[in-house]
Structure formats: C-alpha cells, structure tokens
Image (cartoon, rainbow, N blue to C red):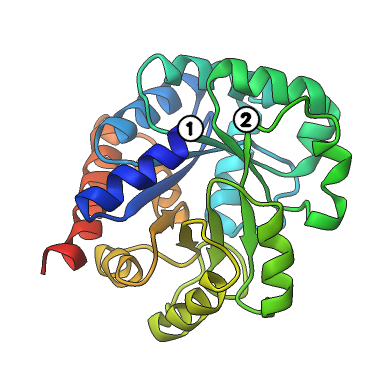
Amino acid sequence: MNRIDKTFETLRQKKEKALVGFITAGDPNISDSFSIIKAMCKSGLDILELGISFSDPTADGPAIQRSSARALKQGINLRAVLEMTGRLREETSIPIILFSYYNPIYAYGAKAFYKDALAAGADGVLVVDLPPEESDEMTSQWPGDELDLIRLVAPTTPLERMIQIARSASGFIYLVSKTGVTGSDGLDTEDIKDKIGSLRSATKLPICVGFGISTADDVAAVASVADGVVIGSAFERLIEDNLDNPDLVSILANKVAEFKKATKIVTSQ
C-alpha cells in the first residue's frame, strides 16, 4: 500500500476527510517557499499538491497565474521542483503530488521524469492538460506504475466519460466543483453531491473536490459529501497579500490548521 492509499485508509479509520493543499513551488522565492510548504505539511495537510510553474497556465485563475509568474522569475523549473520534493520528503511523510501542465514534463522527458520523481519521493502526478486519449505518449515511457496518475473529472462530464477516465486513474479522482478556472467563487453543495454520486458509480477511488473552496465553511460543506477537499487559490492569495509580512509562514500554517479542523466537523457531529 503506497502513501496515498495509506493516507485515505488512515483518514477513514479516524473518520476524517483529506485536506489536499496546492501550493506553487518557488513562490514567493525558493527559500521562503520551502519554509511555507514545510510548515503547512506539519500543520495539518494530508496531501500536498506541489505546483510546477508554467508560462501559460490556462486552467488556473489569476491568483495561481500570478504565483506561477513569481516563481518563474525566481528561476524555478521542473528540476528545481524535484529537488524541493526531495528536501520536503526528508521533512514530511505525507503524499506529494506533482501538479503540472504537460509541456514541462515533455521537455524534461517522460521516462526521466518518472524515474526522478520517484527518486525524489513523489507519490503521484496530475497533468492538468493531458486527457486519457493522449496520455500514452507519457505513460508508455514509464517503466512501472509506482507513480499514481491523478485524473480530473469536470462537472459537465457524463457518466460514460467518467468510467473511461477512471480506468486509467490511480490514487484519487480530482472532481472539479464547477466550470471555469481555479479561484472562482461560489459553491453548489447539492450539485457537487449529485456529481459525486455519479462518479462513485464509476470508480472505487477516493474523490477529492476542488475549485472555489476558500473558507472553513466551504471546507466543511464539501467534506460532508467528498473524501477530500482541495484548496489552492486561497493559499496563494494569502501569500500574495503577505509578501512583505515577516509572519507569512505562520499565517499559512494557521490557515491550514483552520481548514483541517473543518474537515473533522462533519464527522464529529
């Protein structure tokens, strides 16, 4: 059983839901980014999504786009993210998912990426712009299946398509809560519940929901129907709003603790 499977099994036993946190590696700079992420991992994150900066992040909203731009200005690239992954693995045992667009992996080389990601201690990868029909170009070069391939399911995805996507997924399924880009406001919990019901008929993998989740109330609402809650833009906005604040690390750590507490509310009532 790998780290991702163990995490969800442990959470089920504890009657908790997973707090999945996305953060752009290297934002606002490599040193502070490492300190922020390390503190977040120790403050309650169950799974880390480590964002690999890309010059054209079309699926991301303004907050994550700007975080990616800040990281790129610091010289962050895929190799630097893998190095950071290795350093983080020495500090934390939680699963680390590398979140990327396909271009950086293609340029790095799919086989080399697989080997180096595992060596660094990564547990999975989510390639936001690589649908199942085009994934063989990457996965056919992988010598094994130790690196979980996290798949995205959109709110408009029909059941037949969900089944197709789930066949090649491992680790968990990332259900996008609504159409649009990351960081957009507004959640319809009933609609999310319906989508999760359909998706559960297509897969036995855990289902984590992201997009538009920015408050503890949002976390509690989504945790009541999903196996995990994914938060990204809310963390990046905090970084952006506190770039010159000497308490930046503790601000992020405290927010993680607040969100993690919200994942327990629905199971303790």
In the picture, the disc for residue 2 is 1
Closer to the camera in the image, 30 or 216: 216
- Structural crowding at the residue carrying mark 1, measured as other residues with C-alpha within 10 Å and reported as few (<14), some (14–19) or many (≥20): few
Please identify the quadrant where the C terminus is shown.
Answer: bottom left
Amino acid type, callout 1: Asn
The residue type indicated by label 2 comes to: Glu
Q: Earlier in the sequence, mark 2 or mark 1?
A: 1
The answer to whether the residues at label 2 and label 1 have Cβ atoms under 8 Å apart is yes
Q: Nearer the viewer, residue 256 or 97?
A: 97
* 81 relative to 214 in the view: left or right: right
Give coordinates of residue 104: x percent, y percent.
77, 34
- Residue 65, placed above or below residue 32: below
Q: Residue at x 73, y 24 (%)?
A: 113
Q: Which mark is residue 146?
A: 2
Q: Position of residue 209 (x, y in %)?
A: 47, 63
Q: Quadrant of residue 97?
A: top right
Residue nearer the viewer, 85 or 228: 228
